Amino acid sequence: MPMKSALTSSFLESSKFKKRHSVLIKLVDAMRDCGANLDLDIPTIVFCGNQSAGKSSLIEAISEIELPRSDGTCTRCPMEVRLSTSSSSWECVVSLRKEYDTNGKILDRPQEKYFGSVKAKKDVGLLVIRAQRALLNPERATDFFACVNLDDSPDDLQFTKNVVVLHIKGADIDLSLIDLPGIIRSVDDPNDNHLIPLVRSLVQVYIEKPKTIIVATISCKDDIDNQEVIQMAKSADPEGLRTLGVLTKPDTIELHCEAVWLELLKGLKYKLALGYTMVRNPSKKELLDGLTRTEARNLENQFFESTEPWRSLERDHKCQLGVANLSSELSDLLVRLIEINLPIMRETLQNSMESVDEQLSKLPRPLASNLQREYLDALQSLREHLDDVVSAKKNKDLYQAIMKESEEFFERIRQTRPKFVFGDKAPNDKDKLTYTDVQKLIRERKGRELPGHTSPEVTAEIIKVIRPKYFMTDILIFLLIRLQDPSKAMAGDNKNIF
Ligand SMILES: Nc1nc2c(ncn2[C@@H]2O[C@H](COP(=O)(O)OP(=O)(O)OP(=O)(O)O)[C@@H](O)[C@H]2O)c(=O)[nH]1
Ligand SMILES: [Mg+2]
């Protein structure tokens, strides 16, 4: 069997849960696609560790694609790799998920945008580097990074919390993994000191979620006590129940210094409930020499079969060696975690849906296509509402309480209306309109009317003369009439005003 298949197929073929694995992992991926990860703690596998510990190399080995690797192109943002089996041909679709704005403030809703896609595994590396650079330069057009030849100009940001998402269809396994930037211990330039807590807090956000499996990637090249990931994982998961240790670069261990790593593997030191696995991936030189994926897996097998003390490990511990064993272990763990959490996720989503339905039911009905009609209906209902308020129709007690006062008020206002006085002169009130005044106006405006008829202009003139003075009175009386008998006022019966 080719090594490529040995990586995953042996596990999948032997697994009686193969179909269920696929269904469950696709289910949580679909939930993530809908942005449910913002409201829900979705089971996830997160790779974290010191810078250059070998996290991306490990995910590459599992997923068979190329990710930005150290020495110039290290991981500078979270990379979500979603592998799914399907009958269709192999394809990798890359999208950018912005969860934070340019000031690092969390967005209400993440925005996921298509970035590019490739049909050949060899083309993934460049596309992912382009996608990462697009996120690191948020002020520049995304298309720029998708199409043009990349230059060496410095990026606006050194790290970002926004995510490159890789949807890989036609993979040999259903699994979702997140690759994180490496924890920085020191920086050369003091101006970069702020990057240390920045990356640490990014890692913390991912690993502190209770439904996350922490893959603490520990390089055997460094002293075990210098691996900050151990402390971070311990504070996020004090009992070590969801932390899996992965020991990388075993080929770099100096002769006779293997004991400490052997102790870890056997669970004698830094004990974790999920235990430790050891993997051997290609070094930079081996990659530069053109080592293929198949050769890389062969190299790993040879290494564990020929190097002490690993070759003499007891049978029980042999399954802790190699990428193939690790991928099956991870897939199993993820599915178990999803299964355990499915009822609570369903309940949380049910509650969220009920609260959304309630909010939706409070929204006004959608607008009809005839906007003019909508506008008139809205005006009509506003008018009815105002009528109800003004006429105290729906408030009987208030109506009865003000009845007497309003009648009295109406009468007093009425007393202020202008009065006609027959004769030449109004004895006590110079503001009163006299019969002589009216006759004078009729004479001045006389037109071609039949005898006994008055020109409408005269009526208008009389109103013009009186109205400005008594304008406020008009309104008050009008309102009063409406209060007492709205139907009368509505019918335009406001002749009492004069
Ligand atoms: N000798 C040896 N080198 C390895 C092994 N695994 C990874 N490397 C090399 O270590 C370097 C760093 O690997 P990466 O996979 O980029 O490490 P990383 O943890 O993703 O790095 P950051 O993203 O920068 O934190 C690369 O040059 C790899 O080729 C291993 O098992 N043995
Ligand atoms: Mg990396």
Image (cartoon, rainbow, N blue to C red):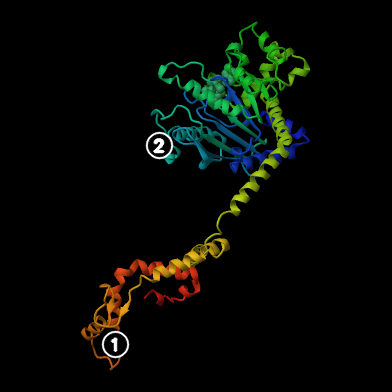
Q: Is residue 369 visible?
A: no
Which mark is drawn over residue 165? none
Residue 454 image label = 1
**Residue 340 against residue 420 in the figure, above or below:** above
**Residues packed near mark 2 inside 10 Å, few (<14), some (14 to 19) or many (20 plus):** few
| Up-down relation of residue 316 to residue 213 (above or below) | above
Left or right of 274? Residue 69 is: left
Q: Label 2, label 1: how many angstroms apart (C-alpha)?
A: 79 Å
Q: In this view, does 463 lie above or below 22?
A: below
Which image quadrant: the C terminus? bottom left
Nearer-N-terminus badge (2/1):
2
Judged left or right of residue 320, residue 449 is left
Image quadrant in which you'd find residue 423: bottom left
Q: Which amino acid does label 1 sit on?
A: Thr
Position above or below: 384 against 204 = below
Q: Mark 1 packing: few (<14 Cα in 10 Å), some, or many (20+)?
A: some
The number of discs equals 2
Q: Does the residue labelled 1 lie within 8 Å of ligand 1?
A: no
Badge 2 amino acid: Glu
Residue 267 picture location, percent across and down:
72, 15
Measured as percent of width and height from the top left, residue 190 is found at: 41, 16
Percent x, y for residue 263?
Answer: 70, 11
Q: To which residue does mark 2 refer? A: 139
Figure quarter occupied by ligand 1 = top right
Would residue 413 be seen by someone viewing this image from the given angle?
Answer: yes
Residue 223 quadrant: top right
Residue 145 placement, left or right of 433: right
In this view, the residue in front, 409 or 306, is 409
Q: What element carries label 2?
A: loop
Residue found at the very far top of the displayed protein = 256
